Amino acid sequence: MHLDLVTPRDPAVVAVEMGYGHLRAATTLAEQLGSEVLHVDRPPIVAAEEERLWRRVRRAYEVVSRLSQFPVVGAPLRFALDWVTNIPRLHPYRDLSAPTSGVLTLERLVRRNLGQGLVRYLRETGAALLTTFYSPAIVADRAGLDRIYCVVTDTDLNRVWAPVRPRETRIHYLVPTRRAARRLLAYGVPAERITFTGFPLPDALVGGPSLAALKRNLAARIVRLDPSAEFRRSMPEELAHFLGSLPREEEGKPAQLTFAVGGAGAQAGRVGSFLPGFRRAIESGFVRIALVAGIRPEVEARFREAIHAARMEPLLGNGIDILYSPTFSEYYARFNALLGRTDVLWTKPSELVFYAALGLPLILATPVGVHERYNRRWVRENGAGLKEREVRFAAEWFTDWLADGVLAAAAWVGYMQLPKFGLYRILEAVHGSRGAAALREGLA
């Protein structure tokens, strides 16, 4: 569904290529607005010198993320990553507004003209800023611009998301969780500058405020996740009320397990550990597995090596699929299409934890960074995510969870418990009364 909200003064949707999370949210918003994502770390927004700075920062983050997953050599890098992404305990409630080293470092970079290409673009076009990364918002705020919207892409956030003087900020934060709102209050951001919206899930997977696509996908998913019908027998009235008649043609079809590594390629090596155990389940038509390499050819190569080592090459395209695309836009579209038919998503607890709201149960791999630990805790506390067990025996515990209805229950809880209207609420916040009217019309 495309809400008719486009105006000549629609916001500039801006992101940074620091993992898929910021790009995923920005692409969803840009699609709905009928615009394109502007990359603050690429021309024409930035000059060559600033682009080189962004490239160095991105490469350093990706290297640390990948190497931190190794058992021995990764220990000091995990410590470094935790230090950089550290988020203090929220309780007891207290003033956390004092600038941290990360905040002061960003302030120094801004003083050295970081982001001035973006500021110039916004002044020339008169566009509002809608960004899914903190630095563009802080740059625009420091330049004295108004109409700055910052979409938070994790359940909790580091102090670096708020400027040096948070009580004076012009940034309007659009947050995916109540905890993120409380965190920003602790950082000194005024309450009137914070709006709880939820995460912007793709319209193709939600189906507008009526949730048409979500309900259709979930109805089929519940059948595939409940081969013994144990879960469906436990709540037939509730399922019929919210989803209508469940599709009988899905009975006996294989459950689709999708394994997705992060944008930095961390945890790609796990495939070699768990894939051999699934041979019998795949050959018997009980399970299908999709391996998501994103836009990284080296990750796709590692997946193919694991399949070759397990002597499972005949199953490629016949029970095992690999999703690789050369560009993010192509990957984004193909990944959304895959999620529409996915029954269980196995991933590290990145921004994909919010996709549990689609009725998509999550198996949660090891977090990379403190923010992902908070993401994992949030989705587990809400009953929609399960912590992975020993990877070598994944086929066994996954099959048990299917037989016992555990995954079907997690799918249902995610749908019932988690916020699904983030995309439309963000558009409402950015467009004010016009957005609210369009949202009400979609719900009618």
Image: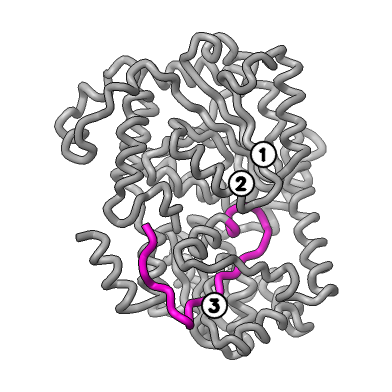
Figure quadrant of residue 298: top right
Figure quadrant of residue 241: top left
Q: Residue at x 44, y 57 (%)?
A: 199
407 relative position to 232: left or right: right
Residue 397 in picture, x, y percent from top left: 49, 19
Residue 110 in picture, x, y percent from top left: 72, 81
Q: Are marks 1 and 2 in contact (CB under 8 Å)?
A: yes
The amino acid sitting under disc 1 is Tyr
Magenta range: 1-23
Residue annotated with mark 1: 324
Q: Which mark is residue 331?
A: 2
Q: Residue at x 18, y 28 (%)?
A: 236
Q: Nearer the viewer, residue 293 or 70?
A: 293
Residue annotated with mark 3: 129
Residue 2 in picture, x, y percent from top left: 39, 61
Is disc 2 surrounded by few (<14), some (14 to 19) or many (20+) residues within 10 Å? Answer: some
Asked if 390 appears above or below 384 in the picture, the reply is: above
